[in-house]
Amino acid sequence: MTSFRKTKSIVALVLLAGTIFSCQNTQKQADQREYDLLIQKAMVVDGTGEEPYFASLLISGDSIAKIDKDTAATYIAKRTINANGMAVTPGFIDTHAHGDPMKTPEFRNFLAMGITTIFLGQDGTSPYFEDIKVWMDSVELVKPSVNVSVFAGHNTLRMMSGAKYDSIPSEKHMANMEKLLANAMDAGCYGMTTGLEYNPGYYAQSEELNRLAKVVGEKNGMIMSHMRNEDDQFVEASIKELLVQGKYCPVHVSHIKVVYGKNKERAHEILQLLDSARTSDTKVTADFYPYTASYTTIGILFPEWAKQPYDYREVVRTRRNELSTYLRNRVNLRNGPEATLIGSGKYKGKNLAQLSKELNKPFEDVLIDNINPYGAEGAYFIMNESLQEEFLKDPYVMICTDGSPTMNHPRSFGSFAKIIETYVVNKKLLTLQEAVRKMTGLSAETIGVAKRGLIREGYKADILVFDPKSVKEHATFDNPAQLATGFQFILVNGKVVKEGEKYSEASNGVMLRKR
């Protein structure tokens, strides 16, 4: 009997060993396929905000085929990148960008700071196409270097619908807007943006905005808003206007800031307003760029009655004294003429105080006679650093540039690099994993970008390989057009498009359309 039991045990062990060998052999055989790229021994910061882990990533085509935490395992790949000592993250997603893929498809400023996907159509202005699919198809043909996504702009919808500068659109024009918006979303737009501080969006009232929000909600999109007024005394009313639209769809505060606001406590008051809305099931988020100067057209300084559809020359002729008083008071309220730096045109690189001295006239007369509402763009030093940093730390706030390849503001060239260099490495305001979440997974989840923003099997291989301590922002207000450095490898849809500081001549971005 004992002999029988021993024999039985030996047979069982042999069968078990055979099974194990068979499984190992099957696994070994499964791993014999050739991958396009192996990223070896990576510290994976996956975009969720969870702790980093070590793994090897295997890329096939445009996607992540396999993630193996056994970093000693061997694979066959056409190319291997040794990521030992470096972080591997999803490519960054810029939730609020500007630019024209037809004119600058290389988008080098974005790519240099690790951005692999951008969202255009911001501040209420989108490509002027009644059938935006035509524009999207054109983007596909130019093959941009980054993935391009777009929102439908409310101001553009107003102009195309015939509503234009009407305070209350006719029912015909309102119906046109709703139809144009629905068609744009069916074509692949991710929602609608508003630019209520600009014309013609400035004229829109709540009923119009709420009707459009219903269309966005029915199409499973979201509204991003450059709100009506970001000044300290008006910002809460502006947020509440947006939150009403949040009854119909998710809403998002573009480039959250408080103009003239001071200190952390003021930031907490604003964040509490957003938190309270969430307790009522309103989905509300925001994005942020890490600079205390904004940037937009010089027209932001002028009253509405001095801009289109009004005749500026007639306003100057009949209401000059009133205009001068308005401009003088507004600029002084915005930290004075030294705090307005001209960013384009004839006087680029000089502030209003300098121009006043050089031209020997009051700065308000410089604005009226030498620049006018449409003659330049400017940077405005109007934000408080400690207040803005509180916004950065909030878990519902993601990162954007609000920049473009041609905008003369360092945010266009340095925003995402600055988050790593300043707020992760130097100030330690954020952990690396939380910063990456704000630049990847949070953005993709909020907007609804499928299969991007995370390091996961089956997701698109938009990937960065870098040493966080090597990432540098070089852009300054005096010389903004300086590319960020430090991202050792950048992949877009599975292809290496940047290695060291060398960029591939081939572009691999695609036009992303919401499904």
Image (cartoon, grey):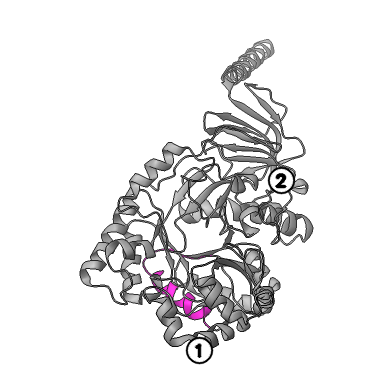
Q: Quadrant of residue 291?
A: bottom right
Tell me the residue at 42%/37% (across/down).
141
- Disc count in the image? 2
Residue 176 has which mark? none
Report x, y in % for residue 325.
Answer: 54, 88
Q: What stretch is highlighted in magenta?
A: 234-254
Q: Is residue 292 visible?
A: yes
Q: Is mark 2 on a helix, strand or loop?
A: loop
Q: Quadrant of residue 261?
A: bottom right
| Magenta stretch holds residue 253 | yes
Type of amino acid at the residue the image marks with label 2: Thr
The quadrant the N terminus occupies is top right
- Which dot, 1 or 2, sits closer to the camera? 1
Q: Mark 1 points at which residue?
A: 321
How busy is the neighbourhood of tag 2: few (under 14 within 10 Å), some, or many (20 plus)?
A: some
Residue that sits furthest to the front in the current view: 360
Q: What element carries label 1?
A: helix
Report x, y in % for residue 255.
Answer: 56, 65
Query: Residue 10 or 448: which is nearer the viewer?
Result: 448
Residue 485 has which mark? 2
Tell me the residue at 44%/79% (across/down).
306
| Magenta stretch holds residue 69 | no
Query: Residue 451 or 123: which is nearer the viewer?
Result: 123
